[in-house]
């Protein structure tokens, strides 16, 4: 099983366990691309028919904060997709990082059942 590990705030953790938070969003930055995207040989997000391809995970291991005795839960991922950010004129938002152009984007995980939890 491929598992993504994420830190989350208590409020959102509780909502996931209650079943009211059904999606998790994470901004994709140059230093997190390899965590959230399938990468090509040059280190950029792969795309297929103009759609960026998220890295495959079966589940997310959520941890509340950074304490040693923190609550955690393993949650199934039903689906994942990458959304590109647009400005008010529907133009893709681009920025430079270390002189390289990047598109502003986020990964969206559709959450399924809670597989395991420690609260």
Image (cartoon, rainbow, N blue to C red):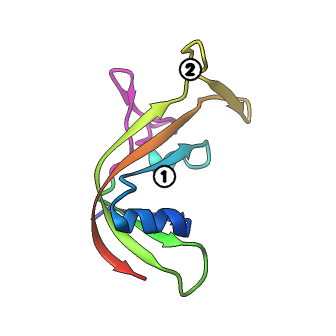
Q: Which mark is residue 25?
A: none
Q: Is residue 57 left or right of residue 82?
A: left
Question: x%, y% of residue 81?
Answer: 37, 39
Label 1 packing within 10 angstroms: few (<14), some (14-19), many (20+)? some
Can residue 51 be seen in this snapshot? yes
Secondary element at tag 2: loop
Label 2 packing within 10 angstroms: few (<14), some (14-19), many (20+)? some
Question: x%, y% of residue 62?
Answer: 45, 68
Q: Residue at x 45, y 33 (%)?
A: 83
Q: Is residue 29 left or right of residue 119?
A: right
Q: Quadrant of residue 107?
A: top left
Q: Residue at x 73, y 30 (%)?
A: 99
Residue in the foreground of this view, choosing between 46 and 109:
109
Residue 8 among magenta residues: no
* CB contact under 8 Å: marks 1 and 2: no
Q: Residue at x 61, y 42 (%)?
A: 30
Can residue 4 be seen in this snapshot? no
Provide the residue designation for mark 2. Answer: 92
Q: Which part of the image, by quadrant, shows the N terminus?
A: bottom left
Question: Farthest bottom residue?
Answer: 69
Provide the residue designation for mark 1. Answer: 35
Residue 42 among magenta residues: yes
Q: Quadrant of residue 61?
A: bottom left
Q: Which part of the image, by quadrant, shows the C terminus?
A: bottom left
Magenta extent: 37-56
Q: Residue at x 37, y 68 (%)?
A: 17
Disc 1/disc 2 C-alpha distance (Å): 22 Å
Question: Farthest right residue?
Answer: 98
């Amino acid at each position: 099983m491929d598992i993504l590990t994420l830190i989350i705030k208590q409020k959102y953790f509780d909502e996931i366990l209650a079943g009211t938070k059904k999606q998790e969003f994470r901004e994709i930055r140059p230093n997190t691309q390899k965590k959230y995207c399938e990468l090509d040989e040059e280190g950029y997000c792969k795309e297929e028919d103009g759609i960026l391809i998220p890295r495959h995970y079966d589940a997310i291991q959520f941890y509340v904060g950074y304490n040693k005795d923190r609550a955690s839960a393993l949650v199934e991922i039903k689906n994942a997709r990458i959304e590109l950010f647009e400005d008010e004129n529907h133009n893709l938002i681009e920025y430079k990082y270390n002189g390289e152009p990047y598109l502003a984007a986020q990964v969206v995980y559709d959450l399924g059942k809670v597989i395991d939890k420690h609260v």
